[in-house]
């Protein structure tokens, strides 16, 4: 017995006509939409796109066409990188004042400590560029491009632990099941490349000396959006995509014939049951076929000049490194892939911070510089938005034993630093301020919904008009609480 037919058989007359009215309305809207997008006599290139945008998107002329999101998973210490606090030295090993903590929650990892001793950064800071931005000695290469980036010191979040904080950063909600930023952009704006996914995820390796939190696929999941908008993760080592090559004895013509036959069967299945995921399956099989040619060409860097490779640092020729991932990100956006997300792990320094943070910065600093410099010289930075962010910041007080040469820092959601560069963002800017302990925001707070609203704005999307109906609600990346575009960092 077919449950769908049984459901229709048992409907009352009133239910049938009510549902039929809605269904016919949907058909009419679909036909109108198709007619609106119909190709003129000369042909419309949108009709040939595998990843077309939604009708009416973008809402206004975008400054950025694509993004590269550099996620430093674990929570980099703002105190040791971008948020310079020279006055902390006089508070060394003193108790964090109650007037600063203000009874704010802390994690169970430090709540049992008898003391909360203030730990000034042991790293030197200096001013750089025309903007005079203060940058730690740990980031000498990023310091060279401070006039191209906007450093936002006043970002804050709701979550205090990694998994909900990363989920909130990437999806706008601590609750799993929401689409990631990349999936929203794939859904709304599509991609201009027919041979590569609209949303690509890279997860470079990290030093075995540092601790790392697990990564969850919800950070690049499509959530309640159609699954074709889920990020495609390219592997750091070996074949970028498993089982992409044809099996032995199967040539391209045979594979094409098989996929065409399978698409026909799936189309019949969709006509019978109307499941939109069937269309996703057809699209993904087709994309996999196209990627058989596009991915090997994408990952072949033999044509890159030594001058270009030198921009990214010594690790760029080693597959799976952060430097190699940044070069691959440039090659992806050069091919008009809409979203590239790089997840670099190992930034969770609860102890031995001076040693481990130095390792992380050595691993990423040169490549971040190379990415910005390479995009800029190719004219891609003007319409590519680059975001560097962790999920939260670190505490000013030491977790565990404090000495002059060693300390740790716990999670701190109340303030942390993010930087942005490229399409729509004003470079050479330091935005927002924190108190003398980098514990509370004193000027221009930016919550994560504000950050996402700003990213969408740079891509020509009004976040208030960008929604998807799910479970009876109009869902948005920026949620239902007030969110604003941070106009102070826009060009």
Image (tube, helix red, strand yellow):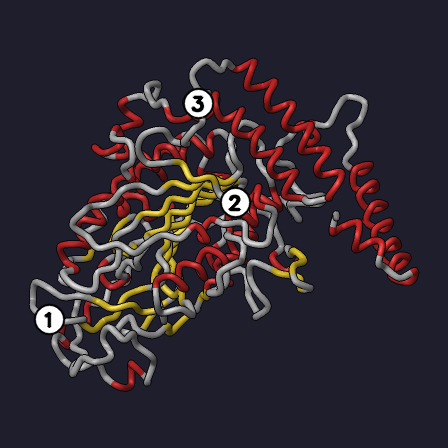
Do the residues under discs 3 and 1 have CB atoms within 8 angstroms? no
Which element type, helix, strand or loop, lies under badge 2? Answer: loop
Q: Is residue 3 left or right of residue 198?
A: right
- Location of mark 1 (residue): 402
Q: Disc 3 to disc 1, how far (Cα)? A: 54 Å
- Location of mark 3 (residue): 245
What residue is at 65 percent from the left and 23 percent from the top?
Answer: 261
Do the residues under discs 3 and 2 have CB atoms within 8 angstroms? no
Q: Foreground residue, 342 or 490?
A: 342
Q: Is residue 481 left or right of residue 77?
A: right
What residue is at 34 percent from the left and 23 percent from the top?
Answer: 301
Q: Residues within 10 Å of mark 1 (few under 14, many from 20)?
A: some
- Location of mark 2 (residue): 230
Compare marks 1 and 2 and give the one earlier in the sequence. Answer: 2
Residue pushed farthest left?
404
Residue 228 spot, x, y in % from top left: 57, 41
Q: Foreground residue, 340 or 291?
A: 291
Compare marks 3 and 2 and give the one earlier in the sequence. Answer: 2
Residue 205 spot, x, y in % from top left: 27, 42
What residue is at 54 percent from the left and 60 percent from the top?
Answer: 485
């Amino acid at each position: 017995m077919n449950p769908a037919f049984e459901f229709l058989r048992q409907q009352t007359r009133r239910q049938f006509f009510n549902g039929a009215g809605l269904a016919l309305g949907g058909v009419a809207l679909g036909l109108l939409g198709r007619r609106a997008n119909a190709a003129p006599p000369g042909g419309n290139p949108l009709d040939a796109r595998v990843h077309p945008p939604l009708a009416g998107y973008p809402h206004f002329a975008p400054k950025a066409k694509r993004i590269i999101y550099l996620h430093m998973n674990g929570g980099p210490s703002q105190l040791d990188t971008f948020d310079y606090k020279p006055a902390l030295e006089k508070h060394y090993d003193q108790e964090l004042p109650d007037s600063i903590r203000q009874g704010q929650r802390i994690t169970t990892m430090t709540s049992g400590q008898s003391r909360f001793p203030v730990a000034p950064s042991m790293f030197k800071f200096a001013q750089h560029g025309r903007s005079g931005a203060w940058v730690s000695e740990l980031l000498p290469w990023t310091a060279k491009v401070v006039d191209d980036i906007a450093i936002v010191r006043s970002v804050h979040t709701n979550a205090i632990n990694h998994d909900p904080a990363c989920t909130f950063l990437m999806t706008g909600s601590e609750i799993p099941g929401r689409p990631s930023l990349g999936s929203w952009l794939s859904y709304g704006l599509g991609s201009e490349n027919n041979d590569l996914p609209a949303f690509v995820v890279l997860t470079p390796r990290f030093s075995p000396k540092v601790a790392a939190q697990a990564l969850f696929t919800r950070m690049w999941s499509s959530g309640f959006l159609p699954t074709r908008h889920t990020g495609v993760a390219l592997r750091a080592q070996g074949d970028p995509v498993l089982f992409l090559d044809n099996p032995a004895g199967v040539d391209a013509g045979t594979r094409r014939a098989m996929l065409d036959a399978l698409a026909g069967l799936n189309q019949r299945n969709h006509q019978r049951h109307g499941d939109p995921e069937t269309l996703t399956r057809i699209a993904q099989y087709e994309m996999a076929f196209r990627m058989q040619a596009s991915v090997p060409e994408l990952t072949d860097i033999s044509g890159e000049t030594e001058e270009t490779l030198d921009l990214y640092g010594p690790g760029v020729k080693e597959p799976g490194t952060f430097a190699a991932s940044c070069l691959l990100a440039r090659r992806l956006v050069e091919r008009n892939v809409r979203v590239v997300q790089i997840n670099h792990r190992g930034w969770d320094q609860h102890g031995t911070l001076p040693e481990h943070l130095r390792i992380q910065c050595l691993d990423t600093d040169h490549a971040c510089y190379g990415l910005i410099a390479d995009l800029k010289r190719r004219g891609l930075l003007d319409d590519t938005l680059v975001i560097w962010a962790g999920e939260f910041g670190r505490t000013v007080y030491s977790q565990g034993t404090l000495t002059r040469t060693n300390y740790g820092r716990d999670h701190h959601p109340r303030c942390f630093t993010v930087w942005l560069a490229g399409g729509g963002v004003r470079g050479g800017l330091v935005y927002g301020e924190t108190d003398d302990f980098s514990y509370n925001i004193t000027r221009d707070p930016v919550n994560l919904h504000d950050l996402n609203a700003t990213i969408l704005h740079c891509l020509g999307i009004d976040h208030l008009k960008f929604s998807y109906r799910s479970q009876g609600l109009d869902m948005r990346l920026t949620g239902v609480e007030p969110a604003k575009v941070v106009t102070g960092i826009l060009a």
